[in-house]
């Protein structure tokens, strides 16, 4: 507190303290940071975790380099980008579903083709089964597309609905309001700092004028100027205290909220991982079921016997076993 009288011309403790702060700390966009190498070494809040709460305290220049982007805004943009990526993944799966549906439709249509329907024997049986397998395969792909919709596309699309962006805006507004308060407190500190410097300068000038008899100022005038200087020092200390309280509140909210965003990002990644794994599971199942539709075809193809086919055809279509002989004279 600035409550004791000081010898004329002396440097006030407040002034010395302010000078020391300026030498060891720097204020960037109204946030105070220690200068490199000054003060005790700061330990990470969550060492070895690369946590959001440790790496987004300073502001960042935007791509154009024209304005500063608060570190918290970078975290919010990450969340919005994640939401967009999730939406695009859902659209990708939707396109895959359309392909599967169209493929199933064409397979089913092809299975009804009359081409080579008159093939006979064991080869004819294999050919008939091959066409039937197309119909079975079409069913497999149709079921695959339905499961992709219900178990992959829809969960990706509906995970965190419209309220998610509203929640992010609440976080944004809350932290932004604290930054505005911090800027206001910082402005008050600078105003109080200037007022103290002016009062100290006025006291020094009046004291010097009294000493060399250049003014009719009385000792009472000196006391009055000293009181004003002391009051200005008290005002500065009060403003600095309010600034520090606000910065501490912002710091606490930044830690809490950034860790909440970190938790949300982990949930998003794990959710997508879970449903992309479901995609691969369904894909493997489709391959397995498709294999089962081909297995009867493989079996019948292995049973194709040209000799047997010839026997069956001959028995059904023969026109007589008696062979021609030479004509007698």
Image (cartoon, rainbow, N blue to C red):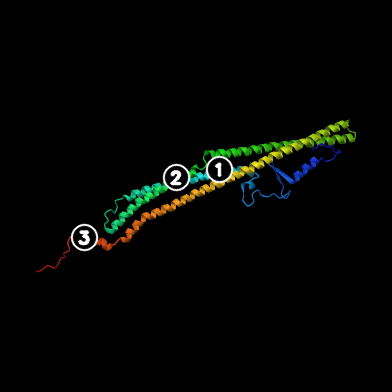
Q: Nearer the viewer, mark 2 or mark 1?
A: 2
| Depth check, front residue: 243 or 89 | 243
Relative vertical location of residue 204 with respect to residue 278 in this rendering, above or below: above
Mark 3 or mark 1: name the one nearer the start of the chain.
1
- Residue 267 shows in the view: yes
Mark 1 lies on residue: 80
Q: Is residue 162 left or right of residue 99?
A: right
Q: Which residue is mark 2?
A: 150
- In the rendering, which numbered label is found on residue 55? none
Q: Between residues 192 and 227, which one lies in front from this camera angle?
A: 227
Quarter-of-image position of residue 30: top right
User: Residue 163: percent from the left, percent from the top?
Assistant: 54, 38
Taking the image as shown, residue 84 lies to the left or right of residue 32, namely left
Element at label 2 = helix
- Near mark 2 (Cα within 10 A), the count class, few <14, some 14-19 or many ≥20, is few
Residue 69 is at least partly visible in this image: no
Disc 1 element: helix
Quadrant hosting residue 287 = bottom left
């Amino acid at each position: 507190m600035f409550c004791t009288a000081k010898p004329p011309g002396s440097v006030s403790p407040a002034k010395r303290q302010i000078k020391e702060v300026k030498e060891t700390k720097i204020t960037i966009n109204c946030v105070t940071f220690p200068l490199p190498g000054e003060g005790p070494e700061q330990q990470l809040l969550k060492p070895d975790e690369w946590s959001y709460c440790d790496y987004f305290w300073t502001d960042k220049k935007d791509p154009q380099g024209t304005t500063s982007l608060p570190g918290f805004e970078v975290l919010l943009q990450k969340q919005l980008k994640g939401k967009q990526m999730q939406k695009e993944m859902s659209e990708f799966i939707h396109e895959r579903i359309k392909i599967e549906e169209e493929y199933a439709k064409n397979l089913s249509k092809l299975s009804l083709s009359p081409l080579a329907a008159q093939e006979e024997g064991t080869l004819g049986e294999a050919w008939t089964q091959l066409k039937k397998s197309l119909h079975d395969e079409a069913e497999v792909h149709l079921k695959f597309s339905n499961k992709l919709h219900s178990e992959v596309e829809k969960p990706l699309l509906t995970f965190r609905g419209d309220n998610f962006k509203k929640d992010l805006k609440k976080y944004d507004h809350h932290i932004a309001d604290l930054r505005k308060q911090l800027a206001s407190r910082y402005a008050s500190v600078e105003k109080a700092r200037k007022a103290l410097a002016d009062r100290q300068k006025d006291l020094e000038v009046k004291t010097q004028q009294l000493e060399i008899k250049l003014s009719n100022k009385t000792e009472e005038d000196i006391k009055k100027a000293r009181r004003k200087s002391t009051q200005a020092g008290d005002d500065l200390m009060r403003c600095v205290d309010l600034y520090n309280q606000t910065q501490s509140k912002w710091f606490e909210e930044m830690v809490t909220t950034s860790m909440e965003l970190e938790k949300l990002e982990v949930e998003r990644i794990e959710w997508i991982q879970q449903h992309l794994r479901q995609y691969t599971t369904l894909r493997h199942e489709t391959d397995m079921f498709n294999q089962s539709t081909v297995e009867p075809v493989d079996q019948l193809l292995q049973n194709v016997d040209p000799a047997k086919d010839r026997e069956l055809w001959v028995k059904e279509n023969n026109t007589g076993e008696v062979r021609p002989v030479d004509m007698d004279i």
